[in-house]
Image: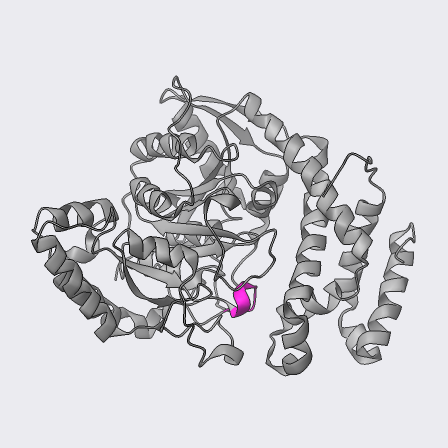
Amino acid sequence: MNPEDLSVIEAAAAIREGVLSPVEYVNSLFARIDRLDSRLQAWVTLDRNAVLAEAARCEAEAGNKQFRGSLHGIPVGIKDIFYTKNLRTTMGSVLFENFVPDYDARAVTRLKDAGAIILGKTVTTVFANLDPGPTRNPWNPAHTPGGSSSGSAAAVAARMCPAAIGSQTLGSVGRPAAFNGIVSLVPTRKRISLAGVFPLAWSLDHAGMFGRRVADVEVMLDAMSEFPVEKPSRGGPFRIGVVRGFFDDNATAEARSLNESLADKLANSGFVVEEARLPGIFDLAEPVLRTILRSEVASIHEQLFRAHAASYGEKLRALIETGMLLDATLYVRARRLRQKYRTDMARLFQKFDALMTPAAKGTAPAGIGSTGDPVMNAPWTLADFPTMTLPHALGSDGLPIGAQFSGPPLEESLLLALAKAIESVVGFSARPEL
Amino acid sequence: MLDATTTSELTRTLRLRAEEKFGKQRAAELQSEVEQMAAELQKLSATLVEIEDEP
């Protein structure tokens, strides 16, 4: 057994059965990090002594058949905008390079309560926006891993940890999952508390998680959710609405073709697959989202930016400055239109259990000067639909391609059940050669 | 108040604001962002909202 190859579910079972030592587990992951991370740069901060002490505690408890929760002894990566008590949290910015919080983000507390070991802090783009960090794609280090949850996605794909958490304001979980060939889930916003998470835009920010199997993100969700995740309310064949139009227009020919192949495969595997037509209000998605984003980002960074403008990257700086030009009435108008958008878009679920699109425009772009385009993910973030990325193919460049599935608000169980069924049909088992 | 009805009028108003806030050079650097924002705002402004549509 190579511990680094284990899924969360497999590792948790092995720890419970006494065949996997939490101490040996973290040591094997540290060895892998030592071997790979100088090249991939997924991690910002690792406190090995603290991690080993925690692993020893987990091991002692397991020896007494005392298990704190479903994630007992499981090492998890934490995106470096989630506050972690006594562990440096930088937000990807030089302005916070020595900041050490004295409390955990609520989501981190919930992970710890479930028995997880906080393995370390993973790279975020600067303040979780588009100015990239140093992380490289494990499938091809000349390519971006996406962002802003760059380090979390790369670390899971490179098997430096079995699971990690991130955040999404436009596409910062779904897109890196696609680029790294792993599974992600961004639940309905109110599922997971954002207390103790440095915001990018309050009303758009969502917490999310990465794993290598659907069952792994499911157990992460159960641990992190502020209220129980209800079981699916219906059975029967899953109904998938394939959304073309805007999403086809923004995908590469390869991504489009592979997405259609997947849709055909699912239709031949017992899923009901039809085209889903977007309502007219979809045309407002981008202006609504960007007006909200600009205004809220400007408000969050107003004071810090005034004092430290030179420390801001160009992309975030432009977002802040244009946000400062906006009238409050237009921001409120955008918020009002967002509510209409959510309501109108949710009517699609009268006919479908999930909506399907490519999870990114194509495979991960070359270069690390950009983290790619969140165009495929942002409409669902705006709608606050729980959304998953599932890897399903490799592109002609050998990099992974992901499909995106969005479900009705607060029906994560239905989405997860559908995703598990798709996962078993697809059987994606490729991994980066590392 | 950004009550201009065309994208070009919005662009002009936003550009002037940017010059006041950030100076002429920076406002020129932000021109493409300002144009994009003006197009976005024009779409929002042109969309009817009802009194019942709360934020």
Q: Is residue A184 above or below residue A33?
A: above
Q: Is residue A283 left or right of residue A49?
A: right
| Model colouring | one colour
Residue shown at 31% from the left, 71% from the top: A37
Q: Is residue A118 above or below residue A288?
A: below
Q: Quadrant of the C terminus of chain A?
A: bottom left
Marks counted in the figure total 0
Residue shown at 30% from the left, 57% from the top: A112
Q: In the image, residue A176 lies at what x, y percent?
A: 45, 55
- The magenta stretch spans which residues? A126-132
Q: Is residue A131 magenta?
A: yes
User: Picture quarter containing residue A275?
Assistant: top right
The answer, for residue B14, to whether it is visible in the render is: yes
Q: Residue furthest toward the top?
A: A236
Residue shown at 27% from the left, 54% from the top: A162
Of B38 and A74, nearer the camera is A74
The answer, for residue A138, to whether it is visible in the render is: no
Q: In the image, residue A28 lies at what x, y percent?
A: 17, 64
Q: In the image, residue A398 lies at what x, y percent?
A: 37, 52
Of A8 and A313, nearer the camera is A8
Q: Is residue A72 left or right of residue B39?
A: left
Q: Is residue A289 left or right of residue A39?
A: right
User: Picture quarter containing residue B19?
Assistant: bottom right
Residue shown at 44% from the left, 63% from the top: A82
